Image (tube, rainbow, N blue to C red):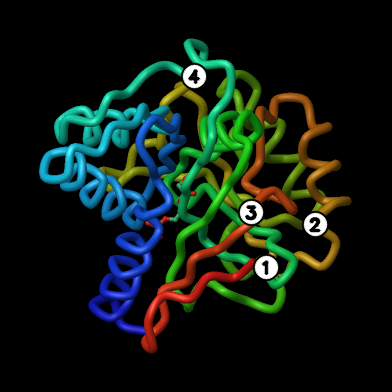
Amino acid sequence: MNEELQNKLKKAAAVRVADYVKDGMIVGLGSGSTVRMLVDELGRRVQEEGLQFTAVATSILTATQAKKLGIKVVDLDSVDSIDLTIDGADQVDSNFNGIKGGGGNLLWEKIVAINSKKIVWVVDESKIVDTIGAFPLAVDVIPFGSQHVLAKFNQAGFEPVIRKDQAGHVFKTDSNNIILDLHLHKITQPVELADELIKTVGVVEHGLFLNMVSEVVVGKESGPEVLV
Ligand code: 5RP
């Protein structure tokens, strides 16, 4: 799928999922280009339609964008729970198991997600797959001793690569951690893999989000479709 079409499908799905946000809600806002389109639409509704909701952001970028558009953004610790979180994803299978972390925000995204009563993902149709894993799996790792985590992942055959930014520097997350991208090709046992990754000392979190979402809004050429 070419980028222009993909962006068009993301936009249509983002506008559709924005309807899920109602007055008075506390809403978790994910990260990435699709969520950026969602936040633009929510900002428009705040400014033009008087929509009033409170947002909890999963990245500094999302928080900055939302605030600029007049959306009220608060810290996660200042709310008891989140009514609804809307986020993007990199790949999703039919059991709603997904890979996230393409933008490096998986740690905050997962913390916001597990404190949410409902989670909805918004993706374009190229991200719906039979088996997740072709997209590299991001793992958030503490910088201290990270070469040893890298070596362990190499030994396990996970083909880890230290993520770099566009300038070629080691990518740093909003928590100042690094990302190891695992080239796993196919993840046939996601639960076992998630367990192994989280038990590795030095790993803070990984981008496997298993069975957490209740709906996926998919941008398709025929129009957005809601999978439940
Ligand atoms: C960031 C994420 C994003 O939600 C995911 O990478 C999808 O991004 P995009 O909407 O740009 O395709 O997990 O950590």
In the rendered image, which residue does mark 3 sit on?
A: 182
**How many marks are shown on the rendered structure?**
4
Tell me whether circle 3 and circle 2 mark residues in contact (CB < 8 Å).
no
Which of the two discs, 3 and 2, sits closer to the camera?
2
Q: Amino acid at mark 1?
A: Ile
Q: Is residue 127 above or below residue 71?
A: below
Q: Secondary structure at mark 4?
A: helix
> What's the distance in space between the residues labelled 3 and 2, CA to CA?
13 Å
Q: Secondary structure at mark 2?
A: helix
Tell me whether circle 3 and circle 4 mark residues in contact (CB < 8 Å).
no
- CB of mark 3 near ligand 1 (< 8 Å): no
Instruction: Assign the N terminus to one quadrant of the image.
Output: bottom left
Tell me whether circle 2 and circle 1 mark residues in contact (CB < 8 Å).
yes
> What's the distance in space between the residues labelled 3 and 1, CA to CA?
12 Å
Q: Residue at x 57, y 65 (%)?
A: 91
**Image quadrant where residue 200 sits:** top right
Q: Secondary structure at mark 3?
A: strand
Q: Is residue 95 left or right of residue 162?
A: right
Q: Amino acid at mark 2?
A: Pro
Seen from the viewer's position, the closer of residues 116 and 209 is 116
Q: Residue at x 57, y 50 (%)?
A: 181
Q: Residues within 10 Å of mark 2 (few under 14, many from 20)?
A: some
Q: Amino acid at mark 3?
A: Leu
In the rendered image, which residue does mark 2 sit on?
A: 190
In the rendered image, which residue does mark 4 sit on?
A: 76
Q: Earlier in the sequence, mark 3 or mark 1?
A: 1
In the rendered image, which residue does mark 1 sit on?
A: 132
Q: Earlier in the sequence, mark 4 or mark 1?
A: 4
Q: Residue at x 60, y 43 (%)?
A: 118
Tell me whether circle 3 and circle 1 mark residues in contact (CB < 8 Å).
no
Residue extending furthest toward the left? 48
- CB of mark 1 near ligand 1 (< 8 Å): no
